[in-house]
Image (cartoon, grey):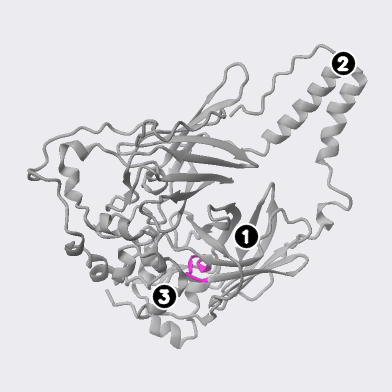
């Protein structure tokens, strides 16, 4: 990744010594970092996408406004031409089923990393992590699907901070995210396993920070840095208004209960359902298949 | 000055690479800990909710790379039989315990032994530093060897397990499974801490590939919510 390189041009003995020490410690500091570039295959042994049933907001600490908004969502919106290629916010790289292709841009003179980029997929924009110390733009600046991300190394952990994401979804089932949402991401590498810890904050729709983690495994097979193109097409006549439900009459609100025995409070993302003590409210027996 | 430079380049790195007085082997794990894992940690169940917070229905094995032999066993899952045989802790073994919705209390048992107690299932894990032994009898929690990884991570390797369940609905792992875990700590916005545990279960008998999951826990100020409960099979 090149960040350990320090060019030492020296003219005097004192400078030689100083430069030598600088080289020594720069190298030692950099050695605490790890190689993050390459192809990281998804190991989908956790069901993070949670997109099996329409009202599955399990594990998301939604506040009341977020819940109402989520229950009003209809996936038929994706049939609308203007939504077909909308893509998902940056959170999706932690949740989605695809691997990560990561590459760096390096300053050709200094050798330091200017940025890392996590490649795109069909419904996920590329995410660039700026490592050159640039500030985040004004809060009034353009918001995009992938947002604006800066990063820095803390020991051997890459820490990234994402802002300026367009309003979108925390989960494909319609749990909403606002344009004030932010994401702090930490990348840990242990051997050939890359684990990403994401802390998502949204003052509009979350009752508390949503913490997710996901692991990827180094792949000898190169992954694509882009996904297939998204092409809009006529899918159906969705009517004159955007498909939606009255939040109090969402017809799918009990699907998780019927199919998996998940209580409604958990399915609709009540924060107390994310803690062990909630199990005391549950019936112990699992229905047979 | 050139001599000084050469000395600097040659000697300093070697000094820096030297173990401190006494050598790393003789430094107690507690004293050399690069992070403080002790305290109460609560599982924050934001992933796999339906597989963890409730007992999944028989046949709901989504996302586990099971071999046909594993599927056959899981399809025959009988929690009542497990209870009758005294095997109600099968889903609380070392390969699965960190996925159990529980509180965990981490303490130093002695200078070279870290201990983790769970309230759910009332299990005890013991992490041995400076140890290579793997003594005889197989247990739910097996035998765990721990080592610090620079700059701040804990690696734990566990073997000598009793066969158990990765998920409560009978998804099996064999007694030959090996569990590798990494413990990392990160700050969270409210000023607290989150413990991230990355778990890899290797079990060629019942898994088509290593089973990799990561779990997160929030640190709690004290043990006021500690609520011990025995294992349940249902």
Magenta-colored span: B96-102
Q: CA distance from mark 2 to mark 3?
A: 69 Å
Q: Locate residue A101, reporting x and y percent.
A: 44, 35
Say what secondary structure mark 3 lies in. helix
Q: Are marks 2 and 3 in contact (CB under 8 Å)?
A: no
Q: Nearer the viewer, residue A248 or A158?
A: A248
Q: Which mark is residue A13?
A: 2
Residue nearer the viewer, A69 or B139: A69
Q: Residue at x 65, y 65 (%)?
A: B144
**Label 1: chain?**
B
Q: Quadrant of the N terminus of chain A?
A: top right
Q: Which of the marked residues, 2 or 3, is nearer the chain's N terminus? A: 2
Residue B97 location, x and y as percent? Answer: 52, 69
Q: Chain of mark 2?
A: A
User: Which mark, by number, is residue A279?
Assistant: 3
Local crowd at mark 1 within 10 Å, few (<14), some, or many (≥20)?
some
Position of residue B230 in the picture relative to residue A241 (left or right):
right
Query: Which residue has dot 1 on it?
Result: B157
On the question of residue B207 being in view, the answer is yes
| Residue A57: image location, x then y, percent | 32, 59
- The reply to whether callout 3 and callout 1 are in contact (CB within 8 Å) is no
**In the visual, does A99 lie left or right of A69?**
right
Check residue B100 for magenta coloring.
yes
């Amino acid at each position: 990744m090149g960040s350990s390189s320090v060019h030492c041009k020296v003219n005097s003995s004192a400078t030689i010594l100083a430069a030598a020490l600088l080289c020594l410690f720069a190298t030692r500091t950099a050695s605490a970092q790890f190689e993050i570039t390459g192809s990281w295959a998804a190991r989908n042994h956790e069901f993070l996408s949670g997109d099996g049933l329409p009202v599955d907001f399990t594990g998301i600490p939604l506040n009341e406004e977020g819940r109402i908004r989520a229950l009003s969502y209809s996936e038929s919106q994706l049939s609308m031409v203007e939504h077909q290629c909308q893509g998902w916010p940056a959170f999706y790289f932690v949740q989605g089923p695809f691997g990560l292709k990561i590459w760096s841009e390096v300053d050709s003179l200094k050798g330091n990393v200017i940025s890392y980029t996590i490649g795109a997929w069909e419904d996920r924009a590329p995410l660039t992590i700026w490592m050159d110390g640039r500030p985040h733009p004004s809060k009034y600046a353009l918001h995009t699907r992938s947002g604006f991300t800066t990063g820095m190394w803390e020991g051997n952990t890459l820490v990234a901070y994402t802002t300026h994401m367009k309003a979108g979804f925390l989960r494909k089932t319609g749990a909403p995210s606002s344009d004030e949402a932010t994401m702090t991401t930490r990348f840990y590498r242990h051997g050939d396993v890359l684990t990403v810890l994401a802390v998502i904050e949204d003052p509009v729709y979350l009752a508390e920070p949503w913490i997710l983690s996901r692991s990827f495994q180094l792949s000898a097979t190169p992954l694509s840095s882009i996904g297939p193109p998204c092409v809009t097409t006529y899918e159906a006549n969705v009517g004159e208004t955007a498909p939606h439900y009255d939040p109090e009459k969402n017809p799918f609100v009990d699907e998780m209960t019927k199919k998996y025995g998940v209580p409604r409070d958990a399915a609709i993302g009540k924060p107390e359902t994310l803690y062990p003590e909630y199990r005391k409210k549950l019936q112990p027996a699992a229905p047979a298949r | 000055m050139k001599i000084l430079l050469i000395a600097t380049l040659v000697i300093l790195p070697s000094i820096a690479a030297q173990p401190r007085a006494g050598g790393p082997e003789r430094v107690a794990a507690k004293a050399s800990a690069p992070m403080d894992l002790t305290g109460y940690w609560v599982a924050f169940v934001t992933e796999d909710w339906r597989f963890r917070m409730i007992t999944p229905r028989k046949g709901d094995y989504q996302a586990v790379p099971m071999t046909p032999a594993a599927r056959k066993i899981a399809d025959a899952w009988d929690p009542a039989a497990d209870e009758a045989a005294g095997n109600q802790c099968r889903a609380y073994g070392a390969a699965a315990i960190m996925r159990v919705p529980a509180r965990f209390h981490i303490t130093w048992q002695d200078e070279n032994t870290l201990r983790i107690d769970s309230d759910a299932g009332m299990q005890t894990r013991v992490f041995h530093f400076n140890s290579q032994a793997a003594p005889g009898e197989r247990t739910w929690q097996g035998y765990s060897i721990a080592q610090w990884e620079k700059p701040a991570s804990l690696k734990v390797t566990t073997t000598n397990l009793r066969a158990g369940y990765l998920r409560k609905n009978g998804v099996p792992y064999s007694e030959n499974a090996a569990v590798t875990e990494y413990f990392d700590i990160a700050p969270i916005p409210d000023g607290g801490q989150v413990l991230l545990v990355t778990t890899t279960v290797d079990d060629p008998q019942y898994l088509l590939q290593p089973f990799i999951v990561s779990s997160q826990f929030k640190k709690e100020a004290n043990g006021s919510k500690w609520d011990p409960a025995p294992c349940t099979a249902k």
